[in-house]
């Protein structure tokens, strides 16, 4: 039986700051490997970063995964949200602490602005916890509207981020 959907390259941001964050990120990577018609092509190192927003909370552990997938963007997002739910994610407070957060950052060269789905993810250029892992695994990636990942400047005013593995 042939796969009617061509494989596309997608990048997923992963973050956690509750219940053993590094372990949560590792479990999320394993869950990504189990997605149908999808291969985990690359994974970044782990990075510890200060939380964004006004809520006092622990630091995050972040990473980025590169997927080669036959799922369309909407189905991939649904599957990412299902992984979040299985891992105990509750969407209670904006900018609040979370067990796991999976963000669809880039889906091929597509620009999508639909209800509940925006790619490229709107905060990529301002978030070191996304840029540094992306630069590590895909420096030549072209992000629609932003250009080549290696050419996007990392915010030197955000000192609380460090590679931890």
Image (tube, rainbow, N blue to C red):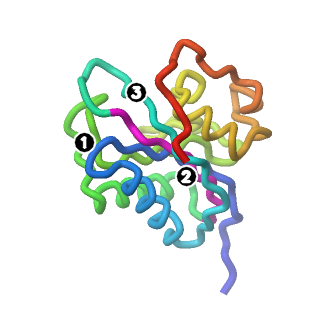
Residue placed furthest toward the top? 157
Q: Secondary structure at mark 2?
A: helix
Q: Nearer the viewer, mark 3 or mark 1?
A: 3
Percent position of residue 34, x then y: 49, 72
Mark with earlier residue (1, 2)? 2
Point out which mark residue 50 bears: 3
The magenta segment: 59-70
As drawn, the label of residue 73 is 2
Q: Residue at x 71, y 65 (%)?
A: 6
Q: Is 71 located above or below residue 73 in the figure?
A: below
Q: State the separation of the CA atoms marked 3 and 1.
A: 20 Å
Q: Which dot, 2 or 3, sits closer to the camera?
A: 3
Q: Nearer the viewer, mark 1 or mark 2?
A: 1
Badge 3, how many Cα within 10 Å: few under 14, some, many 20+?
some
Classify residue 140 by image quadrant: top right
Tell me the element at label 3. Answer: loop
Residue at 72%, 44% in the rendered image: 138
Residue at the (69%, 81%) spot, across then down: 2
Query: For mark 1, what is the residue?
Result: 91
Which of the marked residues, 3 or 1, is nearer the chain's N terminus?
Answer: 3
Please name the residue shown 67% across and 72% down the image: 4
Which quarter of the picture shows residue 148? top right
Point out residue 124 in the picture as x, y percentages from the top left corner. Answer: 57, 29
**Location of residue 161 with respect to 114 vertically, above or below:** above
**Residue 105's x, y, as percent?**
56, 41
Is disc 1 surrounded by few (<14), some (14 to 19) or many (20+) residues within 10 Å?
Answer: few
Q: Tags 3 and 1 in contact by the CB under 8 Å rule?
A: no
Assign the magenta stretch its main secondary structure: strand
Q: Nearer the viewer, residue 39 or 119?
A: 39
């Amino acid at each position: 039986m042939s796969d009617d959907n061509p494989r596309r390259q997608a990048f997923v941001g992963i973050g956690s700051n509750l219940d053993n964050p590094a372990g949560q990120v590792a479990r999320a990577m394993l869950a990504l490997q189990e997605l149908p018609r999808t291969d985990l092509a690359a994974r970044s190192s782990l990075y510890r970063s200060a939380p964004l927003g006004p809520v006092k909370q622990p630091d995050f552990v972040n990473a980025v995964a590169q997927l080669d997938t036959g799922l369309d963007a909407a189905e991939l997002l649904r599957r990412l949200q299902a992984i979040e739910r299985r891992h105990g994610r509750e969407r209670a407070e904006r900018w609040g602490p979370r067990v796991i957060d999976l963000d669809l950052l880039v889906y091929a060269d597509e620009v999508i602005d639909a209800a509940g789905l925006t790619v490229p993810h709107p905060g990529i250029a301002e978030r070191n916890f996304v840029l540094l892992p992306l630069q590590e695994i895909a420096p030549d990636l072209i992000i629609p509207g932003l250009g080549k990942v290696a050419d996007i400047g990392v915010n030197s005013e955000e000192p609380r981020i460090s590679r931890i593995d």
